[in-house]
Amino acid sequence: EDGYRLWLKYDLISDDVKRNHYLTVLGKYAVVGSSPTFEVVRQELSLASSGLLGEGQEVKEKEASLIIAAGDNAATFAKQYGIEWPKQGDDGYFIHDVGSQNQPKIFVLSKSEKGALYGTFRLLKQIQTDDVLSGINVASSPKVQLRVLNHWDNLDGHVERGYAGRSIWNWHKLPGYIDQRYVDYARANASIGINGTVLNNVNADPLMLTPAYLQKVRALADLFRPYGIQVYLSVKFSSPQLLGGLETSDPLEPGVQKWWREKVSEIYKTIPDFGGFLVKANSEGQPGPGDFGRTHAEGANMLAAALQPFDGIVMWRAFVYANEKNEERSKQAYSEFKPLDGQFANNVLVQVKNGPIDFQPREPFSPLFGATPETPLMMEFQITMEYLGFSTHMVYLGTMYEEVLESDTFAKGEGSTVAKVIDGQLFSNHITGMAGVANIGADRNWTGNIMLQSNWYVFGRMAWDPEVSAREVANDWTKMTLSHDPDTVDAVTTMLMDSHEITVNYMTPLGLHHIMGAGHHFGPAPWVDWLARDDWNSVYYHKAAEDGVGFDRSPTGVNSVEQYFPPLKELWAKPETTPEKYLLWFHHLPWDYRVSSSGRTLWNEIVHRYYQGAEDVARMAAKWNSLKEHIDPLQFEQVRMSLAIQQKEAIWWRDACVLYFMQYSQQPLPDNLEKPSHDLEYYQSLSFPHAPGQG
Ligand code: BDP
């Protein structure tokens, strides 16, 4: 098992009783109707039944024990069999058994073919996770409309912040050569409900919009269509100048508007169901409406007007931090976008990173969530491991996503969670979305580490239902990917669930952030103080000095807490009422400050967390090693090696950070702790000029 098959392994079920039970369902199936999507359903059922059961075939409806139907056919079956079908959206599905204990007869019904495809994958998941099928009665609908992967893939095949090899898109061989990987990518996405993909990097190459590339995009769009996946592109705001030879890209200039209208209609002629544009504007050197004295809303709306006749949308990113007020970085997105609330066109979503800075191992949620009742906000999570140890650190992000989505913004009183902002419940948005920056590459196992496939998986599951539990998803993924042995499943699920907190401990405990290597973001480097912008440097973020450590974002400092709703703005203004996980995010505290949960001094608590984190990685590695006989040898070995690297790097993080901060705390390490094996200069001298994934 080399990881290529992801969570869709369909290995023969060895337990006879179970296999026979599933045979009573999947052994004889009927897919009612024919269409490209139903062809996909057929192929998947054939692959799954022959794999899981060793047999299985499509039969006539009357003989079938599993019937998949959509639209009018589904409605007719429901009537005929007296199935009470709960109200649901077009892409939802209803799985219902009308048979008997020994001979189930199961319907997978949906209003749409896409929903029937999702329902089919759901039924297969029930089998892959050992659920009994007789009596099944499951209804599910996506709570978020746009469930989209963002590929940061460049046209030359390099993936920005990618740690799983080259881009899966072989632009050179497209459109003529369709790699089997594209098909398996589409299957994997459809199986978790992902329905959109942005093919290229947000730092966009204008070439993407040239006719030759649009033909390549079309080949992918044609392939993905039956899987319910729409294609989107990142665009460069200055394309009218760069491609069209215009003198300006000013969004209010009629010539510019015309250029985009024509480009968009050319795209739709090629790809009739094209999804729309993703835009990074006036951010990290990218061009944008600000270059012409226009606002983000004016820029977004100009593109939105061109896309609107075709039902296309604009996903406009709020990742900006170079505003004229020159405010502290964590405050800028809010300052820039909050005043624009109500000014965006109907087909614009503003795409906001989960935290106010930048995909750190841990951040409080961005204060924009809840702050824009008139503007639909799209969540942007990072699935790729830019700040979390690339692909050798095993970090399950489900708990991190869950922590963000469960956070209460208090925008409309208690219970106004980020999840409810994103799924549109809070402000009744007409359009909703969640984006994940993909961790996918051309490595055989897709994500550089089998364990990190879980992050692609959980992103899809949480985009479908932002309130699903991270543990439930971890459990499902483990069964589908690694093992059915109950003790192994429990052990791996526990590892996954603990992994994020452990990593935060050995990288950035207690709200520390942005102290990784300059540029590549690999390894510890709290000493970085030489980069051009203040807010690219580690020292700007931790502010360690003899008087203490941490960033004062309370009212005595830069007052970013004012951007949150009460009671958070009051609670987070004081260290005693700030959650410990955000302590040094919001406060600069003396080294002898008492951390309430442990009673330790701040210095001792920091040291404790670094050591605890590193020790916990060793514990995880030992746990994994004990599972050897229950896991496929190749999978086992891949993960074992990664964990060994992670163990070494956790100690590196611990030692480098503790030695660095010790200069300021001027206090020793507690006696009982293992001493760092090198001095601080040694850690500072390490360099990684060719670390992967840089821009
Ligand atoms: C930062 C990455 C950079 C991205 C940028 C973005 O380091 O490579 O281009 O985010 O999201 O975290 O635009």
Image (cartoon, helix red, strand yellow):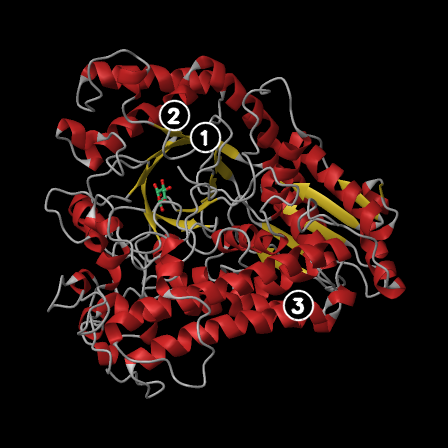
Q: Is residue 54 left or right of residue 650?
A: right
**Disc 2, ligand 1: is the CB inside 8 Å?**
no
Few, some or many C-alpha atoms within 10 Å of disc 3 (few <14, some 14-19, many ≥20)?
some
Q: Are marks 3 and 1 in contact (CB under 8 Å)?
A: no
In percent of width and height, residue 172 lies at 56, 20
Residue wearing tag 1? 154
Question: What element does badge 2 sit on?
Answer: loop
Residue wearing tag 2? 205
Q: Are marks 3 and 2 in contact (CB under 8 Å)?
A: no
In percent of width and height, residue 186 lies at 61, 37
Few, some or many C-alpha atoms within 10 Å of disc 1 (few <14, some 14-19, many ≥20)?
many
Q: Earlier in the sequence, mark 3 or mark 2?
A: 2
Q: Which residue is at a point 23% across and 81% down the rendered structure image?
A: 576
- Residue 82, numbered circle: none
Task: Please state which amino acid type lies under the numbered disc 2.
Answer: Asp
Q: Which residue is at a point 88% across and 47% down the rendered structure image?
A: 55
Query: Quarter of the image containing the C terminus?
Result: top left
Few, some or many C-alpha atoms within 10 Å of disc 2 (few <14, some 14-19, many ≥20)?
some
Residue wearing tag 3? 624
Q: CA distance from mark 2 to mark 1?
A: 8 Å
Looking at the picture, does residue 7 appear above or below residue 649?
A: above
Task: Please state which amino acid type lies under the numbered disc 1.
Answer: Asn
Q: Are marks 2 and 1 in contact (CB under 8 Å)?
A: yes
Viewer-closest of 236 and 93: 236
Q: Quadrant of residue 452?
A: bottom right
Looking at the picture, does residue 416 appear above or below residue 464?
A: below
Question: What element does badge 3 sit on?
Answer: helix
Q: CA distance from mark 3 to mark 1?
A: 36 Å
